[in-house]
Amino acid sequence: MRSVAVAAALLLAAASARAHDFWIEPSTFHPAPGVTVAVGLRVGQDFIGDPVPRASDYIASFSVRQNGADRDIGGTDRIDPAGFLRADASATAVISYASTGAYIELPPDAFEDYLRLYGLDDIVASRAGRGERNKPGRERFYRYAKALLTGLEPSASVTRPLGLDYEIVPDFDPTPRLAPFRGRVLYGGKPLANAPVAALLRGQPGVHLATHSDAQGAITLALPCAGVWLIKSVHMVRASFFAREDWDSYWASLTFEIHEPKPTAKPEPKP
Amino acid sequence: MKRRANRAIPLLTLLALLFLAAPILASDHADPTDLTDPYANITGLFFFPKGDQYIMIFNVRRSLTAPKPYDLSPYEYVVNIDLTTPVTFDKEEDRARYGGTIATPDKIHPDVTFTIHLNDDTTLKDMNVKGLKDPNRIRTFFGVRDDPFIFPRFFNVNVISMVMSIPKDAFPAGQQDFILWGTTSKNGVEFDHVGRSIRTQLPRFFWINTSPPSEHVKILMEKKEKIDKVYNFFRNNKEWYSKAVADLMETSFLIRKYDLVADVMVYTDRLPPGYPNGRLLTDDVVAQTCGFGDCLLRDLSFIEGNWPRATVNDKPFLDDFPYEAEPWPDKAEPLPSTNSILPYLIGFVLLIMIVSWVIVEIVRRLLVWLFGRWRPKTA
């Protein structure tokens, strides 16, 4: 009975995972000190997502780093939001979520469509080279989501890797002001070259920036305006020989809000 | 398999009861469970405007029917008002459930404090008011009145009531928003707390009964994390009885996503008065609280009351000060039960010990017998 339930959950997860992004959406990106922040998980496309209730069995880690300390984020299973934290807010905090792997199997055409949609043309080519184009896509996907909660001060911890298998690490705290987003894409803690990276703006589905990491894993995205941004990337590798799946995919996301610059008071014209 | 599962039920039930025991014991300090210190038990906090006055009513001592004198000397009754921590009213859910949103709950503090001591005949011994202009203009009443709570269990009984009519101009000019809470203490030890009605009465909130509102969210967060872990454990096991324990926890003990709020009463002149914007004497808070998720007391009002459910008090309120109805006549209070569960618990523990000893003795004798049967025979 349990295996049926697990299979059903995986099918559900798989269905929602198919060509879908995953990110963290807190109740506020700029909490006041002492405020309770509800940490929602979202799955969707174009930065429009459905709530993902907490499911402990599929959580590898779910924590917040604030004021130099890491703390697990608790929550109630089957309930959205998936977790709660009490904001310190003295400096920018980093929320992170890592999932356990989930298996998915897609028909050949659907799998290739999804690979192309996410810029994974090298995997399409690899499947063709292996003579697998007519085989179903068998994949295990892992999700690594991060979100930044703006604090009273920028935080250097934003620029440090959290040790996730796949993550986007900013070069500086991007939350205080509008500036080109610069960061690194790390896979297994090491810079990953040529990783597809995209940036989406909440409420503006037409805003879609895309780039690839350079040889040092570095990325630059010229964010055009303030608002809530989702930076995302996916990386796929061949699974090990004994694995049930053929491919392992790693999904990284980073959400944060850049504040609108406060209008400066214009001096009164002199009479 | 089924038999094995059935054998596990008592064990799991015992575990669950052990887990739940803390709230049950600790809820002594709040309605509706029995009290060890009844004069420290808060039964209601009301706040509403009346002309150029604010009316504040603070009631204690549930189910009072006994005649005076009472043992009130050791007790201190305090009502606090925070006038400066910002409250906003733009979130509909918070407004409906709590009267408003307090963005910085850890900053809640008393700007105005009423500290009251009563004589054993319920007359005022002394009252110290801090933070108000000219507190001598406050009109007061201290004495026994009908319990205004619209709830069958507390019909036909009285409370000890402290009523204050406070001139609006005693507060700072332009004051619109108020955050209130009340406490009782005995010999300097806090016993009970009231903020928004029907919060600390619920089992899942007993944790905050003796803490200042500025610490409530922190405490609730910590408890939620622990309780969630236990709940998630039971919820994610395949056995039906494990899920049944999770179901039991979900309705009564799980701290909910909307619970992480300090327990205070919010009142604002910006909105019409009435629960949860302050509280009027006529508010049917049991029904209103059920409307946003907590129906425990409404269930009880159906279980203990008659059809149709009472939605008004058992005595009409007065139009004039002190507004609460006259008290019910004195009568002897029911004697507390003399039965005790302790002998049963001791018997249960003894039974477990005897059964354990028998099992160990059987195993020991079996091992001795096997050793004697199979040991190498020497010539």
Image (spheres, coloured by chain):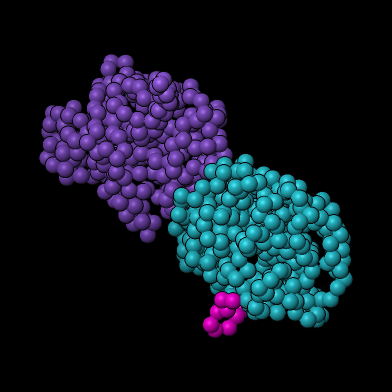
Magenta segment? B303-312
Residue visible at 75% across and 57% down in the picture: B138
Observer-nearest of A80 and A130: A80
Chain rendered cyan: B
Place of residue A244 in the rendered image (x, y in percent of width and height, measured from the top left) = 28, 41
Residue B199: tell me if it is visible: no
Compared with B140, A34 (above or below) is above
Horizontal side of B127 relative to A8 (left or right) equals: right
Place of residue B50 in the rendered image (x, y in percent of width and height, measured from the top left) = 63, 63
Horizontal side of B81 relative to B241 (left or right) equals: right
Observer-nearest of B363 and A177: A177
Compared with A183, A205 (above or below) is below
Based on the picture, tell me whether residue B32 belongs to the magenta stretch: no
Place of residue B196 in the rendered image (x, y in percent of width and height, measured from the top left) = 61, 58
Compared with B177, A161 (above or below) is above
Magenta-drawn stretch, dominant element (helix, strand or loop)? loop
Place of residue B49 in the rendered image (x, y in percent of width and height, measured from the top left) = 62, 61
Residue at the top extreme, as displayed = A215
Q: Quadrant of residue B372?
A: bottom right
Observer-nearest of B175 and A131: B175
Residue visible at 30% across and 20% down in the picture: A220
Based on the picture, tell me whether residue B304 belongs to the magenta stretch: yes
Residue B338: tell me if it is visible: yes
Chain rendered purple: A
